Amino acid sequence: MEYFGQDNFLQLASKLITNAEVKKMKTGGFGTRMGFGQSPALLIVDAQNYMVGPTDENDKTQYPSACPTARKTVAVIARLAEAFRAGKRPVFYTRNVARPDGRDMGVKALKRRMLHIEGWYLEGTKGAEIAPALTPKDEDVVLMKRKQSAFHGTPLLGLLLFAGIDTLVIAGGSTSNCIRATAIDSSTHNFRTIVPADAVFDRIQISHVVNLMDIDRQLGDVVGSGEVISYLSSLPHQESTEAANPIRR
């Protein structure tokens, strides 16, 4: 999949919808570029083994919920995380974890059959662990979540506000589920919302592409990871990541 910069939405749309619909979106002003702010954070959503797949060639665990493109995407996310850390910008993670009895899942348990296996996101399983290639560093913040949006039922919003964040870069998966839900809430809370298309993944390619188009249409900017890294390099270097985890020692 290509990334088209300023005209990303319209060029993506032209491959998915009719010319008349593209024209309607253009005349309606959709897909205007939001741009980056001055204080970014990276949010890595549910980059766990159950989403990414085998941890190495000797891992024989079954991961039926793994996304086909996640493995190559992990390398992109890792580069983004290192760029944020190098600039002393905060990195947040979420982990989607459920009790084995499903009592903390709510209606999610009604829509998705519980998988009582090692390769799903149940507490204490290998599937629930963050992929080894993306192991958080000491300065990173890891949040537990139960629903699709990283904002729902977590302290994420308060942490971002306290850190003075104005731009949230969202990576991980899946594009059509937790990434979209998080992008909606990010935009709702007035953060400049950036989704690097090569740093998110999905189980179904058409869902991936359509949701990127919709995110770029009116929630945030869909860009390439290289643009995010270039943007980070243009920012003044911070002395520490204290804003992300401001506990005085």
Image (tube, grey):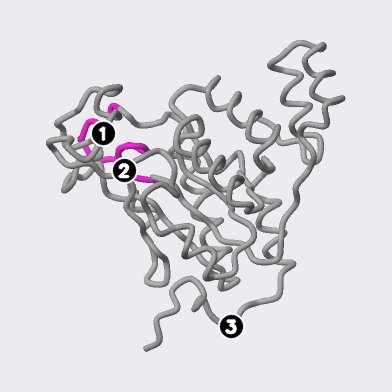
Question: Callout 3, which amino acid?
Answer: Glu
The reply to whether the C-beta atoms of the residues labelled 1 and 2 are less than 8 Å apart is yes
Mark 3 vs mark 1: in front: 1
Query: Looking at the picture, how far across and down is residue 162, in whole percent?
Result: 52, 70
Q: Residue at point 64% right, 52% down?
A: 190
- The residue range painted magenta reads 47-64
In the image: residue 101, left or right of residue 64 = left
Answer yes or no: do the residues labelled 3 and 2 have beta carbons within 8 Å? no
Q: Position of residue 197 (x, y in %)?
A: 61, 39
| Residue at screen point 38% across, 51% down | 94
Q: Quadrant of the C terminus?
A: bottom left
Instruction: Please give the name of the residue rendered at 40% of the width and 86% of the height, measured from the top-left corner.
Output: 248
Dot 2 amino acid type:
Arg
Q: Is residue 146 left or right of residue 161?
A: left
Looking at this view, is 249 or 27 the one in front? Answer: 27
Residue 63, placed above or below residue 83: above
Mark drawn on residue 4: none
- Give the mark nearer the N terminus: 1 vs 2: 1
Location of mark 1 (residue): 106
In terms of secondary structure, where does tag 2 sit?
A: loop
| Quarter of the image with the N terminus in it | top right
